[in-house]
Image (spheres, rainbow, N blue to C red):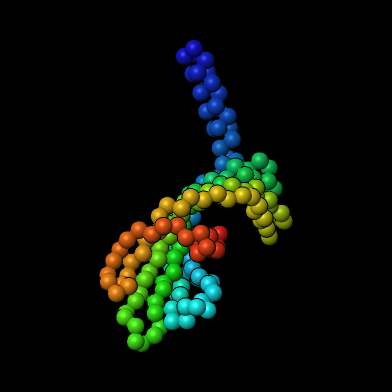
Amino acid sequence: MKLDRLIALAGFLTICSAASAQWRAGITAGAANNTLCLDTQYQYDWRYDDRQGVTIGLTGQYDFTDWLALRTEILFQQRGYTMRRTETYSAETLLRYRDNYLVLPVMASFSFGGNALRGFLNAGVEGGYWLESRCKGALQYAGDEKEELNVKIDFLDARD
């Protein structure tokens, strides 16, 4: 039984080493500016401002042919917004919301063109997991607390 597993492992490593030119790996990093679009007709004294976040992750790609590949990433994404009162008679209010997500897109990557100019088209699906949401700031008191997921606000924009 152990010999069968050893032979299978040796075969797998041989296939992987023969296909090593077809594998690609990389790092993804970037900055995001998140904007919240919300109807504030009954909250005329609140202002929602942009908030910056980061996206970092690992990318892997397997090339089947010159023009077709399977690509996946595992990403950590930050989103958020700032909420503040604009009326002068109200107590100072400034709330900074931050949402953290773990995202896994899987896509087919199509390549076209020649050696001088080459284009790419990626199409696929994406799944994500909401890790946490935090609110820092002052709403007549200073605080830093965890927030519950708000589906109306937190899922307005799937990707930045």
Q: Is residue 73 visible?
A: no
Instruction: Please tell me which residue lies in front, 135 or 122.
Output: 135
The residue furthest right is 113
Instruction: Please tell me which residue lies in front, 69 or 150.
Output: 150
Across and down, in percent, residue 66 comes to 68, 46
The mark tally for this picture is 0
Residue in view at x 55 percent, y 49 percent? 127
Relative vertical location of residue 66 with respect to residue 90 in this rendering, above or below: above
The residue furthest bottom is 88
Across and down, in percent, residue 108 comes to 65, 47
Across and down, in percent, residue 103 comes to 50, 51
Residue in view at x 53 percent, y 79 percent? 41
Across and down, in percent, residue 56 comes to 45, 55
The residue furthest left is 142
Residue in view at x 59 percent, y 47 percent? 106
Relative vertical location of residue 37 with respect to residue 109 in this rendering, above or below: below
Q: On the rendered structure, is 5 left or right of 67?
A: left
Residue in view at x 49 percent, y 18 percent? 6
Relative vertical location of residue 23 with respect to residue 77 in this rendering, above or below: above
Q: Is residue 145 visible?
A: yes
